[in-house]
Amino acid sequence: AMVSDVDVVWLRPPWPLVRYSPAGPPVEPEAALLALADVILSVDQVQQYMDTDKHRWHVDSELNTGIIFFRATRPALAVLDEWRHAMADAIRARNENHDQFWLNQVLNPRRFVEMKKDARARREWVGSALAAQRNRSGGGLPRMPVESAGFDASSPQLRAAFQFERRFGATPANESGIDFKRRPPGGWPGGFRPVLGTFPIARVSNGHTFFIQRLHEIVGVSPVCVHTTYQYGDASSYAYGKRERLREAHLWLVDPPE
């Protein structure tokens, strides 16, 4: 499921970045691993030079829940379950931190197995992920690699995927609910190790990279969407600044003809 905030404008379908499909367009080469990850998030970062292997594709930064993709997998559901419980606990405690804060808390610490660097882990994960994709395809096989060797891990353009070292989603014996603050370092036995990825900042744009930098033009790619963050002039009653930015970019289509 692709989930986005109300202040996101979609410019083209995002599916070539997130999934293999027998009927849809092929996956973008840079997203060959991303299209198997359990959870994919946008980021608030603006530095294109850091959207690389050297800087782990911004995965250690603040992750933005304004644009987020959850695959229909048990590891993704385990992340959602921990996030749901963290927010429910915060509401009961009258903690005013928002949902994005709690997802970032749940996803800490960010110690990973890097699938692009670890060939053995990549073989194990890719094999099971591809099998799951084929089982869900209903007989029609999407255009995808048949094994981990089908991914060029040496390519600097291939976005990395990161598998958590610890487990999500299980609970200690004889208890209900999930208290992520009490979670042991490796997670509760019986949990799942989700694979996380991040969207390219020039394609899944924030307000700074799209309106100010025009990063998609500099890099030479077609943006998929823009999340109108980093804007000023909004009021509590209306997002005036965001509206004006969208008007300037000819993306605000709800004004009357006059």
Image: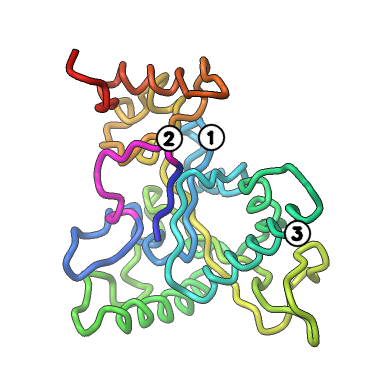
Q: Quick one: SS at disc 3?
A: helix
Q: Quadrant of the C terminus?
A: top left
Describe residue 53's horizontal placement relative to residue 31 as left or right: right
Nearest the camera: 103 or 202? 103
Q: Which residue is mark 2?
A: 7
Q: In the image, residue 195 lies at what x, y percent?
A: 52, 65
Describe residue 221's horizontal placement relative to residue 101 as left or right: left
The image shows residue 212, relative to residue 56, as above or below, that is: above
Mark 3 near mark 2, Cβ–Cβ under 8 Å? no
How much space separates mark 1 and mark 2, taking CA atoms? 18 Å
**Residue at 47 percent of width and 55 percent of height:** 40
The image shows residue 73, relative to residue 252, as above or below, that is: below
Q: Which residues are magenta?
A: 6-17
How much space separates mark 3 and mark 2, taking CA atoms? 27 Å
- Residue 16 colored magenta? yes
Nearest the camera: 118 or 249? 249
First in residue order: circle 3 vs circle 2: 2
> Which disc, if any, is residue 45?
1
